[in-house]
């Protein structure tokens, strides 16, 4: 599974990253977690609000820090 956190490194981006990592660890799944900080790449995704979360290349959240519970629900669909 490929999970991407899109953001420029702000505190909210860091919190979302931590929540994603915790959710993946709690589920015990293998996932490639990457951080996209290049503004041009973020714009290519069409993201206007950060942080954003993409799963398998599909944006699933923008402009909010998702909880571990919400992330678990999203990635287990």
Image (cartoon, helix red, strand yellow):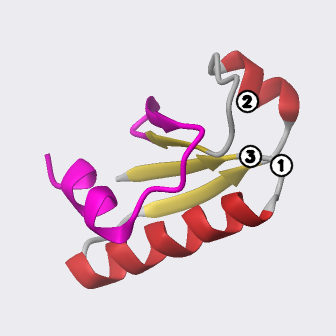
User: What whole-number distance in Å separates the C-alpha atoms at marks 3 and 2?
Assistant: 7 Å
User: What whole-number distance in Å separates the C-alpha atoms at marks 3 and 1?
Assistant: 4 Å
Mark 2: secondary structure: helix
Residue 24 to residue 50: above or below = below
Residue under the point 41% across and 80% down: 22
Q: Name the residue under label 1.
A: 8
Report if the CB atoms under discs 2 and 1 are less than 8 Å apart.
yes
Local packing at callout 3 (Cα closer than 10 Å; few below 14, some 14-19, many 20+) is many
- Point out which mark residue 41 bears: none
Q: Name the residue under label 2.
A: 42
Mark 3: secondary structure: loop
Number of labels in the image equals 3
Q: Answer with the quarter of the image where residue 11 lies.
A: bottom right
Q: Mark 3 points at which residue?
A: 7
The stretch drawn in magenta includes residue 67: yes
| First in residue order: circle 2 vs circle 1 | 1
User: What whole-number distance in Å separates the C-alpha atoms at marks 2 and 1?
Assistant: 9 Å
Q: Can residue 43 be seen in this view?
A: yes
Mark 1: secondary structure: loop
Q: Which of 11 and 39 is in front in this view?
A: 11
Residue 28 to residue 40: above or below = below
Report if the CB atoms under discs 3 and 2 are less than 8 Å apart.
yes
Lateral position of residue 75 relative to residue 21, left or right: left
| First in residue order: circle 3 vs circle 2 | 3
Q: Give the range drawn in magenta.
A: 55-77
Residue 53 to residue 23: above or below = above
- Measured as percent of width and height from the top left, residue 66 is found at 44, 56
- Measured as percent of width and height from the top left, residue 23 is found at 34, 73
Residue 26 to residue 14: above or below = below
Report if the CB atoms under discs 3 and 1 are less than 8 Å apart.
yes
Q: Which of 30 and 54 is in front in this view?
A: 54
């Amino acid at each position: 599974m490929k999970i991407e956190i899109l953001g420029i490194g702000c505190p909210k981006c860091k919190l979302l990253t931590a929540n994603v990592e915790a959710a993946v660890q709690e589920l015990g799944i293998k996932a490639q977690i990457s951080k996209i900080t290049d503004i041009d790449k973020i714009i290519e995704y069409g993201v206007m609000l950060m942080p954003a979360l993409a799963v398998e290349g599909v944006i699933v959240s923008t402009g909010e820090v998702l909880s571990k519970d919400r992330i678990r629900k999203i990635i287990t669909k």
